């Protein structure tokens, strides 16, 4: 394919050419031709190349690494807003989940987790830190807090598997509801290293408190790569009025 003069802007033509390369020739994390190479190959201006590549970066199809170049982004995994474990979520979407336990201990919970779990100052809690991956690529860094008293011996279980399943099968604690807050932030040095993204790369942060029969059983914060994970929500209009996203349909 070539970029030609005509009614379709050249940057849009080049974007389609690059998109075909991404979908048909290049694998995730493969480098795309440099700006200079694209200018010479398609006989277009640097401004045209920058516009085409910039659009693909904004769409999440490419990503840049400072000083190294531009690379093909892995396909985003879309998540419906429902209560399920990471393991269940990934398997349902046809991806192979895996987990590395970065740390697990019994300690005193910090005030936010203690309040979310309804614990007293003297109550003990489990802190479980894990790196979650899909198809071998890091997807999320997760820090969970769970009350120790109703879950004796939890840290002796296989924490690379679904904690939700462990709670249900070993303790009879089925998580049936949750309250969740979502925001965006840039990757700090720790999460940039763990998730293999540049520092300050966009992350989606989920903070969730899950309940079993009305009792809080888990308080977790998860940092997801925004280039590989997106959330799908179905909104319904209700008589209630208010401000914020989702109220103005």
Image (cartoon, rainbow, N blue to C red):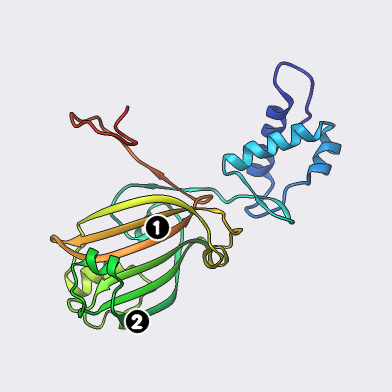
On residue 91, the disc is 1
Q: In terms of image quadrants, where is residue 178?
A: bottom left
Where is 77 relative to 235, above or below? below
Image quadrant in which the C terminus is located: top left
Residue 141: image location, x then y, percent: 45, 64
On residue 105, the disc is 2
Q: CA distance from mark 2 to mark 1?
A: 28 Å
| Left or right, 97 with reference to 28 | left
Note whether residue 100 is visible: yes
Which residue is at a point 37% across and 62% down the rendered structure image? 221
Residue 51: image location, x then y, percent: 70, 34
Helix, strand or loop at disc 1? Answer: helix
Mark 2 against mark 1, which lies toward the viewer?
Answer: 2
Which residue is at a point 46% across and 56% down the rendered structure image? 224
| Left or right, 65 with reference to 177 | right
Helix, strand or loop at disc 2? Answer: strand
């Amino acid at each position: 394919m070539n970029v030609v003069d005509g009614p379709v802007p050249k940057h849009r033509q080049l974007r389609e050419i690059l998109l075909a390369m991404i979908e048909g020739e290049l694998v995730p994390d493969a480098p795309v031709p440099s700006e200079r190479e694209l200018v010479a190959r398609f006989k277009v201006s640097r401004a045209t190349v920058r516009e085409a590549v910039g659009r693909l970066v904004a769409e999440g199809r490419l990503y840049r690494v400072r000083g190294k170049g531009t690379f093909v982004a892995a396909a985003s995994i879309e998540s419906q807003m429902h209560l399920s474990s990471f393991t269940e979520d990934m398997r349902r979407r046809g991806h192979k989940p895996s987990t590395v336990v970065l740390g697990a201990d019994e300690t005193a919970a910090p005030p936010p987790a203690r309040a979310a779990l309804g614990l007293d100052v003297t109550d003990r809690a489990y802190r479980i830190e894990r790196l979650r991956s899909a198809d071998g690529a890091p997807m999320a860094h997760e820090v969970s807090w769970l009350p120790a008293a109703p879950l004796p011996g939890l840290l002796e279980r296989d924490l690379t598997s679904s904690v939700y399943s462990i709670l249900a099968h070993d303790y009879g604690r089925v998580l049936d509801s949750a309250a969740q807050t979502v925001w965006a932030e840039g990757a700090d040095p720790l999460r940039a290293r763990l998730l293999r993204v540049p520092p300050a790369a966009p992350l989606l942060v989920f903070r969730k408190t899950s309940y079993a029969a009305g009792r809080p059983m888990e308080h977790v914060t998860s940092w997801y790569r925004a280039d590989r994970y997106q959330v799908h929500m179905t909104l319904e209009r209700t008589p209630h009025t208010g401000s914020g996203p989702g109220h103005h349909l």
